[in-house]
Image: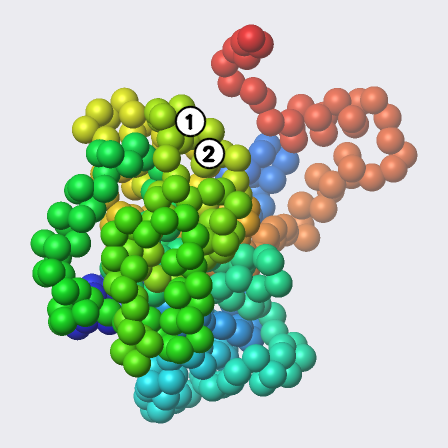
Amino acid sequence: QPPFEAEFSEILLCKNELNETLNNLSHWSKDEHVEKNMVMQLDSVFIRKDPYGVVLIIAPWNYPIHLVLVPLIGAIAAGNCVVVKPSEMTKNSQRLVAEVLPSYLDKLAVVPAGVPETTRLLENKFDYIFFTGTWDGVTLPISAQGKAHCVGNPVSGSSRGVEMQKKLLPALREAITEFYGSDPQESPDFGRIVGEKRFYHMQRLLHSGHVEIGGETDEYDCYIAPSVLVDVLPSDPIMQEEIFGPILPIVHVANVDEAIEFINSRERPLVVYAFSSNDKVVNQVLERTSSGGFCGNDTLMHVTLTSLPFGGIGNSGLGTYHGKFTFDTFTHRRRCVHRSMGREALNALRYPPYNQQKLGIVRATSEVKRKGACTLL
C-alpha cells in the first residue's frame, strides 16, 4: 500500500478504535438495568457484561494491521484472553505483529501459521472465534472484494459495476489517468498485488469479458494495471468470487430497475454503492436491496466511523464490529435476576396447586400490554 492509504485505512482506523474504546469503556462495561414487569418490581434485574473467555482472532491479508488490532482492542476491552493468528501471506506484517504485541500485552499469544498449523490450532478449545474471510464457502464476520484503493486489499471496495457503459467508461478512464498518470506502474500512489499466487489468479480473471481499460501486467513487479472489463457475463469466473485486485467488471443494464434485479438475484453483498445525481435513485437502491452496508455517492467511508456497525449479512458475513459494536461482539450479555429471600411469599402464586385465580393474577402482573391500535392491511 502507498503510505497515504496505509495511514488512512490501517493506522488511523486503529487509533480511532482505541481512543473510542478508552473514552467509553467504563460506560460500556456497566451493568445494564432493564425494564421490569409488575411481578419483578422489587427485584434487581440487569445485564452483566462478561468476557467469553479465550478468544481466537484469525485475520486476513487484505488489511493485515487493521483486521488484527481493531478486533483485538474490543476483545481485550471486554476482558478476554486473546490468541491472534495473522495472515501468513503478509509476512512483514505478520512478523511485526508477532514481535511487537507481546511486548505490550501479557495476555496475548501471536501464532504465525499457515493452513496446516491453523488447522491444528483449531483443535484447541476457544470460547469465541472471530474469523475474517471466506472459509469452506461460509463467510464469517466479513468478506469483500477489490478495487484500486489498496490494490488487492479492500475490505469493502467496489467489486462490480452495474451501469450504462457509455456513460461510465469515459469517466473511469479519465479518473485513472488523473489519479495515477499515463502509466500507473510508475505512480508511487498505486499499490501492488500481495504475492505471486494472487497475481497469477488476477491475471486469469482478466480473461473474463473484454478488457476495455488497462489489462497490463508485470509478474516481476506483481503489478496489475487498473482494469475495467466489459461484456461480462454473470457466469464468468470474475463474478463468482472475491476479486481482491484492481479489476472492475461491468455488467451492462438498461435502467435502475434492471440493476436492482441483478443485485437481488445474487447473494447479499457486504456493501452496495449507488451513484446518482438524483437522490430518489439512490434511495430506491437503498430501499429495494439488502446488504451489510450501504453508501450513496461514495465508497468506503461507512467503514471509517466507529459509530456505525461494520459487517455483512447472509453469505457476506455474520456479526458486526467497530467501536461499541466490537466490545459487544466479544461480550457475553449475562441475564441476571437477584431476588430477596424475604419476599418468597410472593412466589406462592406460581406454585401448585394451580387455580384460575392464580393464573389471572400472574397474567395481569406479567403480561406485556400492547400500546395503540393495530391495523391489518
Residue 182's tag is none
Q: Residues within 10 Å of mark 1 (few under 14, many from 20)?
A: some
Residue 187 drawn above or below residue 31: below
**Disc 2 target residue:** 262
Residue in the image at 38% along x and 30% along y:
253
Amino acid on which disc 1 is placed? Glu
Q: Are marks 2 and 1 in contact (CB under 8 Å)?
A: yes
From the viewer's perspective, is 194 left or right of 116?
A: left
From the viewer's perspective, is 87 left or right of 137?
A: left
Residue in the image at 38% along x and 71% along y:
199
Q: How many marks?
A: 2
Residue 232 in picture, x, y percent from top left: 42, 44
Residue 197 in picture, x, y percent from top left: 44, 75
Q: Quadrant of residue 370?
A: top right
**Quadrant in which the N terminus appears:** bottom left
Residue in the image at 30% along x and 32% along y:
164
Residue 232 drawn above or below residue 265: below
**Disc 1 target residue:** 258
Q: Judging from the image, what secondary structure is the residue with disc 1 in?
A: helix
Q: For this rendering, which residue is in front, 299 or 75?
A: 299
Asked whether the viewer can see residue 360, the reply is: yes
Amino acid on which disc 2 is placed? Phe
Residue 34 in picture, x, y percent from top left: 50, 43
Residue 45 in picture, x, y percent from top left: 55, 48
Q: Judging from the image, what secondary structure is the residue with disc 2 in?
A: helix
Residue 85 drawn above or below residue 320: below
Asked whether the viewer can see residue 6, the reply is: no
